[in-house]
Image (tube, grey):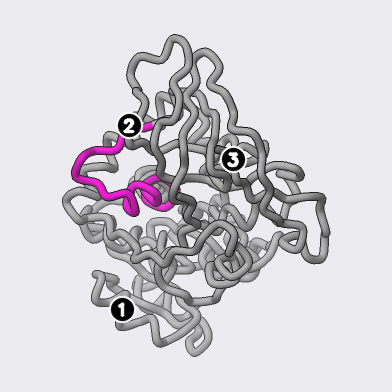
Amino acid sequence: MSNLALVQDGFHKEDPLSTLKVVTKPIPKASPGQVVVHITLRPINPVDFMTLRGGNVVNGSAGSEGFGIVHEVGEGVTKLHKGQRVIPVTAPGSNKGNGSFQKYVAIDADFVLPVPGYMSDEVAAQFVVNPWTAYSLLKLLEVPKGEYIIQSAAGSTLGKIVICLAKHYGIKTINIVRRSSQIAELKALGADEVICSAEEDVGAKLKEITGGKGAWGGLDAVFGTMTPMIAGGVRDEGKVYVYGMLGGYSTTLGVGDLFRGVIITAFVSFKLLAVPEKIHALAGEVAPLVKDGVIPVAEVEKYDLKEFKTALAKAGESGRAGKILLVTA
């Protein structure tokens, strides 16, 4: 047996994904306190593209989450056993090249979650990054029932989870999308309002919907020109959490919003996933929401790890529904 891995061999600033290749490496050994997980499924998330484009994993593997089977148990590990279905939380290791885009990963046992019997392999593979981020963002905003929040990239997997969670908690959502074709689907999920940024004046619509008082807070996956739009639509002293950079790496905050006390702050999911106590607490809080169907699970499309070029192209398609999984036997 050998460890098949998708690695970034060097870095090309203009085309970082061109440096990816599949290689064969030795299977790692479990040090004391670790387990080796045989990963069979791993999703391609937007955060994985950010990692690869940042050149942080040269000679290593990205990959923020996945599903697998315990292959080896290290000395001192008592709560996991060989052959057990598990979720390795690889996000913290991904930035160091020890992510899930490889067949075997050695990881501290504290960062490995047993998979409940009711959860399928495909659901387990995408249990962490999007559900936990959406849940944590809403928790941080502390939105009272009946108040509005604004979110960009509402048609994304994470955006859809926000809509469903907000509906469950009695929070109203204003959802910004780029294509009007997404409106009907989001309304069916429970979105209260959907604004197509390509066809409507976002600022004017936000004032109209909220009666001029502004939304309680905002969630922004786009950044760039989108952030000031959302900032202008939240209440005085409202908070906007930026958790992605789909639209650029810099933005400008209007002086009026600055003097209104609007706060723009970053949410870094990898920091959230770097503390074992937080990981296990979140798993316990989010799992029932998945089990009960409150959090929707994206349909999947599978590609062999060796087909990574096709898989990455599919995962990067604008407006694509579902989740792309890289598969190894």
Quadrant for residue 14, please give it: bottom right
Above or below, comparing residue 289 to residue 313 in the picture: above
| Residue situated in front as seen by the camera: 232 or 139 | 139
Q: Amino acid at mark 3?
A: Asn
142 on left or right of 110: left
Q: Could you say where residue 278 lies in the image, as x and y percent from the top left?
A: 41, 29
Q: Which residues are magenta?
A: 113-131
Q: Earlier in the sequence, mark 2 or mark 1?
A: 2
| Residue situated in front as seen by the camera: 54 or 139 | 54
Q: In the structure shown, which secondary structural element does the residue marked by tag 2 occupy?
A: loop
Above or below, comparing residue 4 to residue 37 in the picture: below
Mark-to-mark CA distance, 3 and 1:
41 Å
305 on left or right of 77: right
288 on left or right of 158: left
Camera-nearest label, 3 or 1 = 3
Q: Provide the residue designation for mark 2.
A: 84
Above or below, comparing residue 93 to residue 263 in the picture: above
Q: In the structure shown, which secondary structural element does the residue marked by tag 1 occupy?
A: helix
Q: Residue furthest top?
A: 76
Q: Earlier in the sequence, mark 3 or mark 1?
A: 3
Can residue 329 be seen in the rendering of this structure?
yes
Can residue 214 be seen in the rendering of this structure?
no
Location of the N terminus (image quadrant) = top right
Q: Provide the residue designation for mark 3.
A: 3
| Residue pictured at 76% horizontal, 45% vertical | 58
Mark-to-mark CA distance, 3 and 2:
19 Å
Q: Amino acid at mark 2?
A: Gln
Q: Provide the residue designation for mark 1.
A: 185
How many other residues sit within 10 Å of disc 2, few (<14), some (14-19) or many (≥20)?
some
